[in-house]
Image: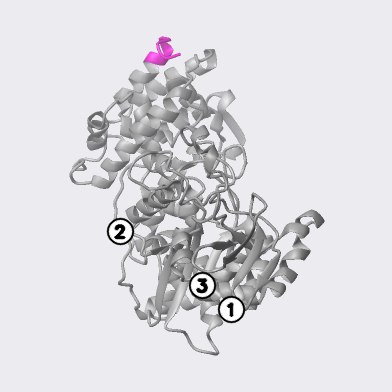
Amino acid sequence: MTRSNMIDLSPEILAAAAESKAWPFEEAKKIVKRYEKTGFPETILFETGYGPSGLPHIGTFGEVARTTMVRHAFRVLTEDKVKTRLLCFSDDMDGMRKIPDNVPDRAALEPYLHMPLTVVPNPFGGDYESFGHHNNAMLRRFLDTFGFDYEFASATDYYKSGRFDAMLLRAVEKYDAIMKVMLPTLGPERQATYSPFLPISPKSGRVLYVPMKHVDAKAGTITFDDEDGTETTLPVTGGAVKMQWKPDFGMRWAALGVDFEMFGKDHQTNQAIYDKICVILGGRAPEHFVYELFLDEHGQKISKSKGNGLTIDEWLTYAPTESLGLYMFQRPRQAKKLYFDVIPKAVDEYYSFLSAYPKQDWKNRLGNPVWHMHDGQPPAIDLPVSFALLLNLVSASNAQNSDVLWGFISRYAPGVTAATNPELDRLVSYAIRYFDDFVKPQKKYRAPDEVERDALAKLAAALAALPAGADGEAIQNAALNVARKIERYQDHSKQAPEGGPGVSVAFFQMIYEVLIGQERGPRFGSFAALYGVGETRALIERALAGSLA
């Protein structure tokens, strides 16, 4: 995904943007409407939040990627006449409420429970001074690989430097009003002890969830009993106190003047609370976009602390970054599973959208995900072979290195080499890696029965009869002609060009199960053209000889 400060503002694009129904434009239009009566401020602030209680996951990245898309749409709608900023805010002053499952030596962190994340030692070693600093760095490292234009903000830095002091003093003044918002949302037991302020114990260093004995608006202090029972008074300024996470949302929005922030569906019930507290503190609640959650392969919400679902690095081990960007763009209001099986489809869909882009008018271009992913400047890439085909080529050829695959590819597409098509070469490496780790362990060849043996023998004969250099379409038609004459593979709900029955998908499923050890694959004709007609016939002979299953 490329990022550029230069954007195309041609009349055609501006006209299409004004009418576009793509979700980034729909969200950007909310911000335009927000200021239609008052005029725009000097800068529009977009914000994303990150809780560094665990390593950043793909959902965290998705929030930044999607917000960036809305920001770009806003720049187009306003002809780039209004400054914009994207602030990635880390709530790293939050107490570590539980020890994540995916850290080394969990016992070593037990003494630091409930301490701010930027105080907890870094369990991963290295030069980072705390667990929070380490996780913040991991987030920034990944966002930087995408070239996002963002500013990073640390809650610890903002609280301790005094950036929030004025708003915290106002929160003391508005303590009763904030409590009136919060208390009805709590159960009786929680109501008895709740406070929007969380003091950090001067003695233990832990973030305390304790009731307030006295709140002094004039002095800007709170009084409470520390863990040892000692009555303690602290200023709310200077990082001695942080706010509970729900009031903290509203306080931050009011303090920074946030105009747009999206969050997951798990926050939706609290949105009204955040907004009310922001208004109580003299701010204006930002525009919101609520997206559906990401799930693991079992349908459970992905969690930083559990480490379930895909990590950022895992996805990028097996696929280009653009495929991940596409996955984030598509259907953000629909819950989506994040596990390894979704990767190949995302890769091929990205290149399919990229291929369609030059042929589209501006209305459809602005609805094409690649326009939003690349800030309106999608690259021109010619990809003669799909990722799914590459995976099946690896599977059939048992290729262990890219040179073997390039031998097939260069024969299939003369003149195409790793040097002339580095994008395809990149996919070749991903395909080998993905096959070795996920496809190969699941491969299960089966022996053909008598009907299948006869079908495969006839398929081999039909392939032998093809002229040299037959393309994928000719190979596909030859396979279909074989299947149409075999009763098992006739589909009477379909009609062949000659008027007889069509071909059941069971025919091609059988081919892949017997020849490649997988339940499904790409179009057979395309695969055989890439692998080679002679090689495909040899593969059939090996299956019939019993050397595969």
Q: Are marks 1 and 2 in contact (CB under 8 Å)?
A: no
Left/right of residue 405 with respect to residue 356 in the rendered view: left
Q: Looking at the picture, which amino acid does disc 1 mark?
A: Arg
Q: What residue did someone put label 1 on?
A: 284
Q: Secondary structure at mark 1?
A: loop
Classify 261 as above or below 313: below
Residue 379's disc is 2
Q: Secondary structure at mark 2?
A: loop
Classify 8 as above or below 402: below
Q: Looking at the picture, which amino acid does disc 2 mark?
A: Pro
Q: CA distance from mark 1 to mark 2?
A: 39 Å
In the image, farthest residue toward the right: 188
What's the magenta region? 542-549
Q: Residue 367: x percent and y percent?
A: 47, 65
Q: Are marks 3 and 1 in contact (CB under 8 Å)?
A: no
Q: What residue did someone put label 3 on?
A: 165
Q: CA distance from mark 3 to mark 1?
A: 18 Å
Question: Can you tell which of label 1 and label 2 is closer to the viewer?
Answer: 1
The answer to whether residue 62 is visible is yes
Neighbor class of circle 2 (other Cα within 10 Å; few <14, some 14-19, many 20+) is: some
Residue at image point 46% right, 60% down: 156
Question: Can you tell which of label 3 and label 1 is closer to the viewer?
Answer: 3
In depth, the one of 379 and 545 nearer the eye is: 379
In depth, the one of 152 and 9 nearer the eye is: 152
In reply to whether residue 106 is colored magenta, the answer given is no
In the image, farthest residue toward the front: 230
Quadrant in the rendering for residue 429: top left
Question: Can you tell which of label 2 and label 3 is closer to the viewer?
Answer: 3
Ranked by sequence position, the earlier of labels 3 and 1 is 3
